[in-house]
Amino acid sequence: MHTLGIETSCDETSAAVVSCRKVLSCETLSSLKQHRQYGGIIPEIASRRHLQVIDKVTQSALEAAGINIAQIDLIAVTTKPGLIGSLLVGKSFAAAVSYSADIPLIPINHIQAHLFAPFLNKTKVKLPFIGLVVSGGHTGLYLVSDFDDIKLISKTKDDAAGEALDKVGRLYGLGYPAGPAIDRLYNPGLVDKTLFTINKQADLSFSFSGIKTKAAYIYRDLAEKKRLNKQKRTAILSSFQYTVINSLINNLTQSLKQLKIKRVVLGGGVAANRLLRESLISLSRKESFELLVTDIKYCQDNAAFIGGLGEYLQQRN
Ligand code: KG4
Ligand code: ZN
């Protein structure tokens, strides 16, 4: 079976060919450069760019996989959540190809697909698990009994973790997106564990807007006094990242205890973060659970995990 995945929920236009979870090709073009000057994604720019390149990206994915459209058995497309104009481009394109080439079409939830990413190029899909999705748009814990039986455990009440890292990093001059830049400059020796604190919530929900505001006040104060040097900036951003990651780890630990599940899956753009990956590895040893972390190249939005999940769901039915 060959599945064509299509992903256009944010700024990445991506197409992939997947066969039995094996990724035969995955072509992704991002419009990120065009958004940088605005310090965030501009939906209108993103959707226009998708429209310009989606045909070319899909052709490239088919060519790279060495097959033609007649050999595709299923098309999987992201239908939610995401930027409405961006989603519309992928959905319309996929629907047109599906209709004209007479190929079945399956709608895919982007967040659930992030949880499928660790199973790409693997022989088995392991269930059940607690899924932690951490990205620029979402932060949540899920109980995944199977991919058609997913229950939300908790999510963020305000900002997503990636969004908080991006906004604070940008304020401190790291540009957009700042998540990877904070990851690179992170220095554990400079972390002040008491600088930012997040109150634990009984419902295991996340909240990052309070510490984001505190980081902004610290910035304003230091900038006014002209005391914001490089070392101070690294110390503040390292402490900020530490607190964000610590909050993810704390809530995950609690949910493991409450639900008595012994398997964890990590997905989403922030899953590329070194501190998060290392902290989860230590936690898995301490709490003896199986950890499945998304391969770095599939953390960022891409169509391989959309195609992979589409194929899995289709074969189950
Ligand atoms: O999953 P994704 O590509 O898009 C969404 O669905 O949101 O995630 C993008 C997010 C951005 O906030 C970006 O700053 C963050 O992932 N990110 C990172 C790292 N790489 C990407 N955050 C922290 N450390 C990283 N290494
Ligand atoms: Zn995503």
Image (spheres, grey):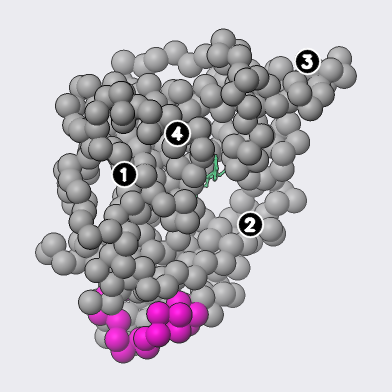
Q: Position of residue 163 (x, y in %)?
A: 55, 38
Give the magenta part as a residue range.
58-76
Q: Which residue is mark 2?
A: 32
What mark, if any, has residue 292 been given in the picture?
Answer: 1
For mark 3, give the secondary structure. Answer: helix
Q: CA distance from mark 2 to mark 1?
A: 28 Å
- Please tell me whether mark 3 or mark 1 is closer to you in this view: 1
Q: State the separation of the CA atoms marked 4 and 3.
A: 33 Å
* Residue sitting at the far left: 317
- Identify residue for label 4: 278
The correct choice, above or below, for 299 with respect to 16 in the image is above
Query: Horizontal placement of 163 versus 305: left or right?
Result: right
Pointers 2 and 1 in contact (C-beta within 8 Å): no
Q: Which residue is mark 3?
A: 221
Give, as a three-letter code, the residue at label 4: Glu
Q: Farthest residue in the right direction?
A: 226
Badge 1 amino acid: Leu
Dot 2 amino acid type: Leu
Q: Does the residue at mark 4 contact the one at mark 3 (Cβ under 8 Å)?
A: no
The secondary structure type at the circle numbered 4 is helix
**4 or 2: tag closer to the N-terminus:** 2
Sequence-first tag of 2 and 1: 2
